[in-house]
Amino acid sequence: MYYMKKLEDSLQIFKDLNLEVDSNGNLKKGAKTTDMVIINDFHNITNLGKKTVDKLMQKKWNPNNDNNNNNNNNNNILFYVDIKNIMNSSEKNIKLSNSKGYGLILNGKEDIQTIKKIKELNRRPLFILLKSDNIYEHVLITRRINELLQSLNINIPYIHYVDINSNNYDDILVNSTLYAGSCLMDLMGDGLIVNVTNDVLTNKKKIETKYDEKEEVEEEGNNKDIHRLLSRVALNSFLTLNILQDTRIRLFKTDYIACPSCGRTLFNIQETTKKIMKLTGHLKGVKIAVMGCIVNGIGEMADAHFGYVGSAPKKIDLYYGKELVERNIPEEEACDKLIELIKKHNKWKDP
């Protein structure tokens, strides 16, 4: 969610939303780019803020704002409206005539008669924003709304919208993952918006995260990734993207599957996994399994594109999907062989 003042700093916004700006000032979308922004008080937008929004709309973005805007002249703008307002107004007072469409906000506590009226709307919403009154009841209301929509044959995608009212990063991480991520794991919902409402966090060091996995810095004798301190908006984007990645809804980086190791592990799985991640971390959407032994390998890596599996002490088997393609590779050669296999199946891109 964006407020008016933040819209004036366009370069920071583009950075927070993972948009690249080329030498000509044009925006470029990538695998990590946020798809949607929600803007409050759109009718009070400043000239600087308007320039930022115009830039976003040039890339076919869809800024979302409330339905009280009286100057809606751009057909790329979407509106969000509470279901009670749209029912009370019978749609005629909602400024939708020049808009691309609208999203309908539900809090999950609406009765069945109210939900039924969605089917009677002359112009149906493009999507539903499911916004619970508080994060702790989000799973419960999601299950309720999911069942109602299915029973009434209302086939409208719905997006989880969760406000996280905390200034402690540990609580933010746990709450967003537990109460929103678990719904997506259960195949309930089609997207996610995480909105951390506080600008000041009590343990800022913990919100530092990888900015560029290709760069390293020497610190206290160990190689450590360069980190940056995320802004609130960038934190929202970071949390949302990683929950979508972990629930397999949107893959924006390499996905790794690795066993935690046990007495059957036939190589140093921790160091090997780090090495493989360093070599392949830029392959967005590729799934790589690193398994310590064949006992767990086949089952746990079933949906991986490539498998790296211990077959004997310091010997590695490589898989493409479930197919064993090379057996008993010396451990010191296995990573290079894995890269060759990825290239063979056209999944490799140079860093």
Image: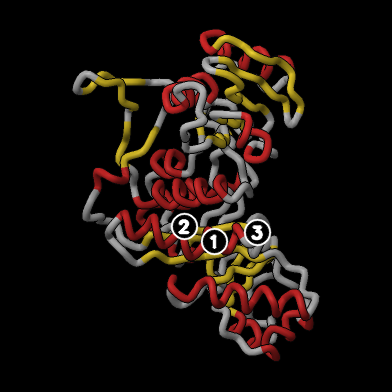
The picture quadrant where one finds residue 55 is top right
Q: CA distance from mark 2 to mark 1?
A: 7 Å
Q: Please tell me which of labels 1 and 3 falls first in the chain.
A: 1
Task: Give amino acid for label 3.
Answer: Asp
| Left or right for 126, reference 283 | right
In the image, which disc is placed on residue 190? 3
SS under mark 1: helix
Residue picked out by circle 2: 177
Task: Give amino acid for label 2.
Answer: Thr
Q: Please tell me which of labels 2 and 3 falls first in the chain.
A: 2
The x and y percentages for residue 186 are 63, 62
Q: Please, is residue 285 above or below residue 326 in the view?
A: below
In the image, which disc is placed on residue 182? 1
Q: Nearer the viewer, residue 319 or 175?
A: 319
| Left or right for 75, reference 26 | right
Q: CA distance from mark 2 to mark 3?
A: 15 Å
SS under mark 3: loop
CB-based contact (under 8 Å), mark 2 and mark 1? yes
Tell me what residue is drawn at x 43 percent, y 66 percent: 163
